[in-house]
Image (spheres, grey):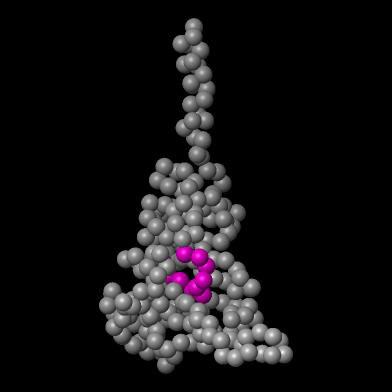
């Protein structure tokens, strides 16, 4: 009798054991990339693993990229882009597969990682004077396109000339476009304002 009771109890709870990780009412399911697949629900994105477990809960700050199957966030080299709005400006950073921030939001745009490198737009801030009336420094901002590793360390400057930018929400309504294209680990193509490409050697920082 006791064995029969446990058998019946197991049969009753079996469906809950097998389907406890079932995810319902998903709007979009992306292909697996880097062992995780993005899933969309109510304008938020999360990630499932190959067992179907939701390993990164639904959130609204993940950055979507364009693929043949559609637009969705994706992991590459154990990194996924996300954004944070600071004073009305969108900054990009990266999380790992646990959802932990590993590169804090600090860039105006980013590419996905490939061969453990990503192209990002990095802002530089220089103090050029002091406003006695307002009682604060006068600063100017410019940016470069740089190559970083998966820890956020700068490996090389892809663009050599800084581009000026007014760092306020009024002027930065859209993220600046990345104009460089890494051809291989040694060469980069830069799109110029005259609508032509320059091909330069990548000079890595020692």
Q: Residue 26 placed where, x, y %?
A: 54, 49
Foreground residue, 146 or 59?
146
Q: Is residue 72 visible?
A: no
Residue 113 sits in quarter? bottom left
Assign the C terminus to one quadrant of the image.
Answer: bottom left
Q: Is residue 153 visible?
A: yes
Q: Which residues are magenta?
A: 103-112
- Apparent side of residue 42 relative to residue 164 in the rendered image (left or right): right
- Apparent side of residue 16 relative to residue 133 in the rendered image (left or right): left
Q: Residue 165 placed where, x, y %?
A: 55, 85
Q: Residue 201 placed where, x, y %?
A: 29, 83
Foreground residue, 13 or 157?
157
At 57% across and 66% down in the image, what residue appears?
84
Foreground residue, 117 or 54?
117
At 31% across and 81% down in the image, what residue appears?
203
What predominant SS class does the magenta segment belong to? strand
Q: In this rendering, is residue 198 above or below 57?
A: below
Q: Please check the rendered image and state whether residue 1 is part of the magenta-colored stretch, yes or no.
A: no
Q: Residue 179 placed where, x, y %?
A: 42, 81
Q: In this rendering, is residue 118 above or below 142?
A: above
Q: Please check the rendered image and state whether residue 111 is part of the magenta-colored stretch, yes or no.
A: yes
At 60% across and 91% down in the image, what residue appears?
129
- Apparent side of residue 88 relative to residue 6 in the rendered image (left or right): right
């Amino acid at each position: 009798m006791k064995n029969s009771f446990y058998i019946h109890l197991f049969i009753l709870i079996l469906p809950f054991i097998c389907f406890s990780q079932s995810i319902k009412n998903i709007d979009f399911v992306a292909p697996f990339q880097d062992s995780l697949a993005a899933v969309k629900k109510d304008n938020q994105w999360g990630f499932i693993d190959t067992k179907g477990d939701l390993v990164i809960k639904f959130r609204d700050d993940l950055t979507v990229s364009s693929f043949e199957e559609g637009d969705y966030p994706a992991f590459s080299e154990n990194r996924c882009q996300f954004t944070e709005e600071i004073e009305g400006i969108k900054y990009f950073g990266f999380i790992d597969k646990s959802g932990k921030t590993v590169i804090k939001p600090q860039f105006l745009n980013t590419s996905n990682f490939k061969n453990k490198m990503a192209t990002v737009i990095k802002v530089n801030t220089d103090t050029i004077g002091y406003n006695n009336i307002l009682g604060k420094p006068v600063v100017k901002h410019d940016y470069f396109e740089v190559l970083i590793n998966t820890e956020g360390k700068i490996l090389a400057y892809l663009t050599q000339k800084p581009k000026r930018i007014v760092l306020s929400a009024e002027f930065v309504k859209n993220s600046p476009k990345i104009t460089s294209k890494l051809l291989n680990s040694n060469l980069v193509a830069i799109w110029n304002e005259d609508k032509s490409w320059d091909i330069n050697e990548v000079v890595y920082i020692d």
